[in-house]
Amino acid sequence: MDDLKVITNRGELVRFSYSHVFEPDSMEGSEDKKYSVSILIPKTAKKTLADIKAKLQLAKEAGKASWGGKIPATFTHELLRDGDIERPDDPAYEGHYYLNAKSKMQPQVIDTEGIRLGPEEFYSGCYGCVSFTLYPYSKGSKGVAAGLGNILKVEDGEKLGGGASAAEDFGVEVDDLL
């Protein structure tokens, strides 16, 4: 399956949204909890997008065996989606493609020094690189999904999802609260 593994290009940082990488979460209507993240890929990230599209084609070819010998003309959910079309009211998705990656195993989340990060340091809105493996499925519907690997945080970004920090609410530095 290494031929279906994607590691986003360090020169083309992605942004993370809907981050559930420290505690597994379940989708509405499901009891199956998984770690997950939405990966926002700038449309200008040519190398990363070319790699994803090439591996996506390989995953589709690998899926033929369980899909009756052919690639379906359409999938219920395409893996790589256009944020400008599918999320037009969300400015974070503007100018990006995105995909969702999930795993039953917790990903390692590290910084550029190799130090493991916790929820205070890694959050929806920061930038970095991510590894994931594409795989075909035919459970109910047919398609290609992304299995979340590991995450490298490279830089901070504006937090997504709203909510103010205690420091913002009270107009103090974080160290002043200790």
Image (tube, helix red, strand yellow):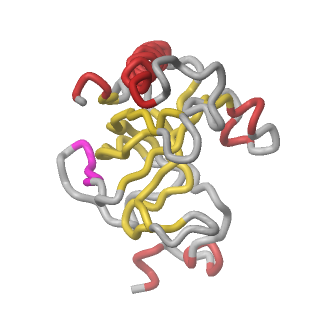
Which corner quadrant of the image does residue 58 belong to?
top left
Q: Quadrant of the N terminus?
A: top left
What residue is drawn where x is 57% and y is 63%?
A: 27
Is 147 left, or right, of 170 in this rendering? left
Question: Which residue is pictured at 29% across the width and 59% down the height?
Answer: 105
Q: Please provide percent x and percent y for residue 95.
A: 67, 27
Residue 57 painted magenta: no
Q: Position of residue 86 (x, y in %)?
A: 75, 36
57 to 19, vertically: above or below? above
99 lies left or right of 128: right
Q: Main secondary structure of the magenta part?
A: loop
Q: Position of residue 162 (x, y in %)?
A: 67, 63
Q: Quadrant of residue 54?
A: top left
Residue 40 location, x and y as percent? 55, 37
Direction left: furthest residue: 114
Seen at 30% across and 44% down, the residue is: 149
Q: Residue at x 38, y 33 (%)?
A: 134
Towards the viewer: 166 or 121: 121
Q: Quadrant of the C terminus?
A: bottom left
Please state which of residues 14 and 166 is positioned toward the viewer in this rendering.
14
Magenta-colored span: 108-112
**Camera-side residue of 172 and 62:** 62
The furthest residue to the bottom: 178
Q: Is residue 110 magenta?
A: yes
Residue at the right extreme? 89
Residue 54 vertical placement versus 149 (above, below): above
